[in-house]
Amino acid sequence: MTDLSALTARQLLAGYEKGEFTPVDATRAALARIEAAEPLVGAFVRVDARQALAQAEASAARWRGKEPRGLVDGVPVSVKDLLLMRGGPTLRGSKAVRPAAKWDEDAPSVARLREHGAVFLGKTTTPEFGWKGVTDSPLSGVTGNPYDPARTAGGSSGGSAAAVAYGAGPLSLGTDGGGSVRIPASFCGIFGLKPTYGRVPLYPSSPFGTLAHAGPMTRDAADAALLMDVISGPDWRDWSQLAPGGSLTAALDGGVKGLRVAYSASLGGQVAVRPDVAAAVRAAVGRLAGLGAYVQEADPDFADPVEAFHTLWFSGAARVVQPLGPEQRALLDPGLREISARGARYSALDYLAAVDARMDLGRRMGRFHTTYDLLLTPTLPVTAFEAGAEVPRGSGHRRWTGWTPFTYPFNLTQQPAATVPCGLDADGLPIGLQLVAARHRDDLVLRAAHALYEAGAAVFSPVPGRA
């Protein structure tokens, strides 16, 4: 029998249309995976099985009447607990948030999913207010990696990545302020896209400002394009949203023949990459060349912008905690308290100097993309390490940005960037390849990623031990 929890959203939709199974069947399969995996992994902060089954029943009735409501009618989805979803609290991984507040509004991306008939399984875990690149919080504890629960799922969208990886629905909504979609997607062996800033509307706006993007976390690039076609719908609450573009699903099949691709193994020697990661990424780059892309080893023209990123990120953290009283602050993750205190000491001139550095970086990458359509790098220089730690043991890093040098620069520049799984290390842990394009060229990122999936060079590997 077909394991419905292993299917993509597109496969589920095809099955619904043919009458092979129903949204109720798919939702029950996802809920069964949650029941089996959650004691070990901890990807969800809240699951609402009754609501999900009621939504699935309604969707099944629409399919029986041959009147599906939208592009993802009946597909089980999950939502990171930084995004509002009406009917329950959005606690943001924090004990400082009051669950008893009024929760009657959807974030724009959640509202679009609801309009398209999605089945909501629940809310996924996040570090407190999404502040770091791993997922543990005072509220929900540690989220483990489905490939090895003793390892981290990454973050800050770690719950969403783990949920998709172990079979709790093929679609999840994440957010990415410095790599928070791509980091856990890479660690958990799934696809993750940080779209061009503004392509997916956000509300309320992030305290981390225009570093923060919402994006899809899926089994493959085609499902991500489908989800993007849903969540890119207009929403008046986000004044910075871009004008709606064309369908990204329709843009998938152009292939990569003739694309000009730069491959940077270490950003010009700035990053020490583990040999097994480097080898898997290089092999995937070779496959892209084999599909007809013109690949050249070339490094983008920038030094590590971590200080500018820290100024903006830590200032955002200070803004997060600013409304909290002393008793609430005492409940916070100690690391969040530390960076927010540092952020509060920056001046307006410090902040504007970081903005200047950001604009210079954007200019440099704009020039780079006049020569190259895509930039390829490792998503991360390492694979998943010990769960519950902010940095790998013995790495010498102080903060999570020390081991994520390939991700946060492209939040500064607002470019579309995705990760595709390109292999496993010696411990059976996933490795990611990052694809970056010029602003507004989300179609190129998805098209190249889809080509890798079609060629078998990007593969979702079943979680070990899964029935």
Image (cartoon, rainbow, N blue to C red):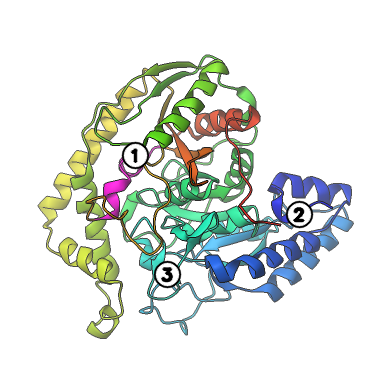
> Where are the magenta residues, as a range?
399-415
Q: Residue furthest front?
A: 426
Q: Nearer the viewer, residue 390 or 393?
A: 393
The alpha-carbon separation of the residues under discs 1 and 3 comes to 26 Å
Task: For residue 251, say whether it is visible.
Answer: no
Q: Amino acid at mark 3?
A: Arg
The alpha-carbon separation of the residues under discs 2 and 3 comes to 30 Å
- Comparing labels 2 and 3, the label whose residue is closer to the camera: 2
* Residue 225 highlighted magenta (yes or no): no
Write down the residue under mark 2: 4
Task: For residue 270, say whether it is visible.
Answer: yes
Compared to 360, does 126 lie above or below? Answer: below
Residue at horizontal 69%, vertical 67%? 31
For label 1, the SS is loop
Q: Sequence order check: which comes first, mark 2 or mark 1?
A: 2
Residue at horizontal 58%, vertical 59%? 163
Q: Which mark is residue 92?
A: 3
Q: Which mark is residue 406?
A: 1
Q: Which mark is residue 56?
A: none
Viewed as shown, does residue 399 lie left or right of 129?
A: left
The alpha-carbon separation of the residues under discs 2 and 1 comes to 35 Å
Residue 339 percent across, percent down from the top left: 22, 63
Q: Sequence order check: which comes first, mark 2 or mark 3?
A: 2
For label 3, the SS is loop
Q: Nearer the viewer, residue 164 or 466?
A: 466
